[in-house]
Image: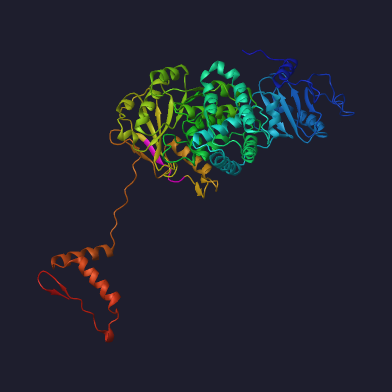
Amino acid sequence: MVREMTEDEVRDLAGKILKFENTDKVQSGVGQLTSFNQLGFNGVKDRPDGWYLPKNIEEPAIILETKNSNQKLENFLDEIIKNCNIASTRYNKVIGILYNGVDVIILKNNEVIETVNTLQNKDYYLSLFRVNKIDKQKIYGLTKKINDCLHTEFGIKNLYHRMIFTACALVAKRYGAMLIKGMNYPTFHTLIHSTLSKSLEDSRRQNQKLDILLEVYSEIKMNSTENQEAIDNFIEWVSEISECVNSDYWNGEDVMGIFFNEFNRYKKKSESGQVFTPEHITSLMYRLIDVHQDDKVLDAACGSGGFLVKSMSNMIKEAGGIQTDKAKKIKSQQLFGIEFDREIFALACANMLIHKDGKTNLEQLDSRTLKAGEWMREKKITKVLMNPPFERKYGCLKIVENVLDNVPQHTMCAFILPDKKLEKDNSASILKHHQLQKIIKLPEKVFSEGVTTSVFIFESGIPQNNKEIFACYIEDDGLETIKNQGRHDIKDRWQEIEDRFVDVVHKQNGDDTIQWIKPNEHLSYQMPEKEFEIYEEDFTKTMMDYVMYQEGIDAKEFSDKLIEKVMYSGCVAEDGEDYVITLKGDNKDEK
């Protein structure tokens, strides 16, 4: 049985969690004796239990009211509202906190709001007043400018090098590098490298592989470094994107995912092997297997880290926001990625670092190997989200099987694979040990490479045993193609589509596309065949063809002569007379 806490104990605990401390910019503290009058509200004798009062009255204030742990907080709403109203005589933004050591009620300008249900650091509550909007169109435009600049002005021909160079600059900005217009290229390049190196100091003790990011950055070669205007433009554009990435204002959107997918549109067909998953599909898959804030998520072919960042953002949002203590744990202990390609691994490291997460568990390994299997087994993974490389030469199904074999039994695993992958390649050994439960066929245009795909959801460690597979088809994702910008949800249709199909998949009913597939017959969604239809014109033509065949008439010759007569020999008969076309048949002249 938990011991009851007195109001004094609750107040002291709240002060430690909130970190209410006086500074030269803020009056802050907890106590029972300090009145509002002493805090600068002349003549007001009421006493708050805790206060956070910035000297800059444009910033938010926080008022705390505490009760002992056996008291119901709802009974004291009038008391916290009264004290918040006192603070409102000076501040336009006031957070009220009602706390009893167990439960917490939060008011934002006197309106009760839904937040994480445990008390958090004050920074979490201060962030509730921040505007959390990211201008995606702005990022698309800036990405195009950066790509063109690096390609034409700096002469970086390799697409991934352009992406890595930009990502490293963004990491440097994220960690305080003063990239200023007018600096020459050597200064600019060295500043990024030194900031990167410093940002990795703590993390490399845990994971030496993070040095690959520095190595790849150092290997990128420029054809031209003398164009000061190009350097200044690059600095300006990177700074603008950096403002969007600033995680203090982050509200769950994968800015780097937007950035990487936009960059990836400039990839040539010869640069195959890496296919970045569109952000709306990572969101769908997260929900299809019910990932939540306590899960340990693995992507063993993580690319630039799109699934990991989507999981990070959703899990942190569920936990209450970026300022919560839980957010730190999610970043450092609950996200795991493997990437074999050295340069793409560098991109994944950069993506995590931009979200202030140098400790994320990323490894550069071949996901088909025993070593990778051992690494996965140690992590006690609870959910898997993956888009492995599709081609057989990259070991697509070997990766899938190695993942399923090395995560705990009953782990839900979602893989994007080509529709017929499990049928074309031998998947018998996978189904012998793991159960394919659901197939969700994705819209035809999800991947620009033209490959049609489905999400295949497995439960690890459970044999198929001929259990039927649920399947459905998302025929349209609502996205539309914008010239020179790729496919985007310009009419905001996707969220409704996602919500509906998540419900369909969970309930396993509610849509006309649903199928139940016998695994000994098929391992893919079966597109319905079009119904056979015959029209009167088809019947007449077939009968005419048959009569002409019986009479030995060449149908093509007849058609050609008819067209010639009608088009070139005067097509209107005079006085109602019929035209006569004579053809030589096998038996006689035909008219």
In the image, residue 542 lies at what x, y percent? 22, 63
Number of dots carrying numbers: 0
Q: Is residue 419 above or below residue 116?
A: below
Q: Is residue 50 left or right of residue 494?
A: right
Q: Is residue 161 left or right of residue 13?
A: left
In the image, residue 413 lies at what x, y percent? 43, 28
Rendering colour mode: rainbow
Residue that protrudes farthest toward the bottom in the picture: 575
Whether residue 321 can be seen here: no
Say if the magenta span includes residue 471.
Answer: yes
Q: Which of the 4 image quarters holds residue 352?
A: top right
Residue that protrudes farthest toward the left in the picture: 587
In the image, residue 469 lies at what x, y percent? 35, 34
Camera-nearest residue between 96 and 6? 96
Q: In which quarter of the image is the C terminus?
A: bottom left
In the image, residue 154 lies at what x, y percent? 56, 38
Camera-nearest residue between 201 and 149? 149
Whether residue 206 can be seen here: yes
Say if the magenta span includes residue 120.
Answer: no
Q: In this view, does 172 lie to the left or right of 216?
A: right
Residue at 11 percent across and 73 percent down: it is 588
Q: Which of the 4 image quarters holds residue 123?
A: top right
Camera-nearest residue between 278 and 455? 278
Residue that protrudes farthest toward the right in the picture: 43
Camera-nearest residue between 279 and 83? 279
Q: Is residue 10 above or below residue 84?
A: above
Q: Which stretch did the figure color magenta?
A: 470-476
Q: Is residue 43 above or below residue 157?
A: above
Q: In which quarter of the image is the N terminus?
A: top right
